[in-house]
Amino acid sequence: MPSSSRGHPTVAVDRVSRSFKVPSLEALKDLGPASRALARFGWRPTVKLQALKKVSFTAHSGESIGVIGINGSGKSTLLRLIAGLDVPSRGTVKATSQPVLLGVNAALQPELSGLANARLGLLAMGFSPEALEEAMAMVITQANLGPAIHRPMKTYSAGMGSRLRFAIAAASQPEILLIDEALATGDETSRNRAEERMDQIREQAGTVFLVTHSGQTVEQTCTRAIWLHHGELVQDGPAKETATMYRWWAWNVANGKHDVADKILRQETAKGAAMAEALAKATTADKSARSGKPKKPGNPGQKPHRGTSPKSDRPGRGDEDGVTS
C-alpha cells in the first residue's frame, strides 16, 4: 500500500447534500383521481431522491483517496460535485485548482482514432501546441495500445478506452485527479501502470480520488478511504482499515447475515460521526487560536469553484428525506 504523506488542503467538502427530483409512476398510488387522470395524458409525478446527506471531509496534497460503497451510495455524484460538473443542494465544495475528472474533461469521439482523440483531448484540457508533442508521447506510452492507437475508438474494448482516457487525464499532471472506476476494466499490466502514475501524481503534491466497488483495489492503491452508504458517510480513515471493514460488511450481506452487517454499519457510522465531530472541533479551535478570535469552520485559503451552493450557509428542511440515487 502507498505510504501516506499529507500536505496542504486541496479539496474541502462541507456539509454537502445533493437531492434530485425524478419522475416515478409509483407515486401515482398516493394521488387523487384528478392527478391519475392527468397521468394518462403524459404528466408524471416526481419523487425526491437524496444522493448525498451532509457529507464533510478535507482532502490534502499527497493523498490517494478511495471512495467505496455499493451502487447508489452517491460515489459518482460526489465526484461530479468535486469536479464542478454539478452543484450541491446544500453545503459547499471548495478546491485549490480545477479538478480533472477522468473520461469527462477529454472530449473523445468514437469515429476518430485513439491518436486523434489523444490530441483532441489534450487540446481540450488547454495544452499549447508547443507542449502537445511531449504530452502525446506520454499518452502513447501510458496507454500502451500498440498499433490500436491508430484505429477508431469505437473498435476499442472497455479496458482499452479506459486506458486511453486515464493516459490523457494523467498527462496534464493535475493537482486534483478524479477517477471513476477506471482501474476496474484494465488488465493487470495496465492497472499496475495506472497505479504507478497515480503514485507519481501524489509525489508531485497532487491528490487522487478513486471511486470503486473493490475494497481490495483501495487497499492496494490508496492511502485513505471514504465509505459511503445510501448517501451518508459511514467511515473516513486509513485505506486498509476502512476497506477491510467495508469488505467484511459486504461479505456478511452477500451471505445473508444481515443482522451482523447492520451492526457493523451502525458501529462504523457512529464511529465515523464521532471522528468527524472531533476533527471539526479541533480545526475550529486551531483556527481560533491562530487568529486570536473565534471563527466558523472553513478553509478561507481555498478558492470556491462551480461546486458551491448559494444556499450553503442556510439550514433547510428535507436533508434527510428521500432515498439514495
Image (tube, rainbow, N blue to C red):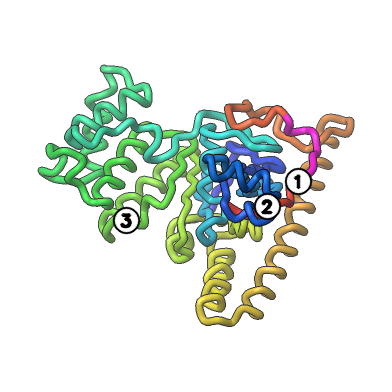
Secondary structure under badge 2?
A: loop
Provide the residue designation for mark 2.
322
> What span is colored magenta in the figure?
311-318
Of circles 3 and 1, which is in front?
1
Counting residues from the N terminus, which is met first, the one under dot 3 or under dot 1?
3
Q: Position of residue 49 (x, y in %)?
A: 62, 49
Q: Is residue 154 left or right of residue 15?
A: left
Q: Which amino acid does label 1 sit on?
A: Gly
Q: What residue type is labelled 2?
A: Gly
Provide the residue designation for mark 1.
318
Residue 66: in magenta span: no
What's the residue at 64%, 43% (across, down)?
19
Residue 312 occupies which quadrant of the picture?
Answer: top right
Q: Is residue 59 visible?
A: no
- Kindly check if marks 1 and 2 are in contact, taking CB atoms under 8 A apart as contact: yes
Q: In this view, does 225 lie to the left or right of 189?
A: right
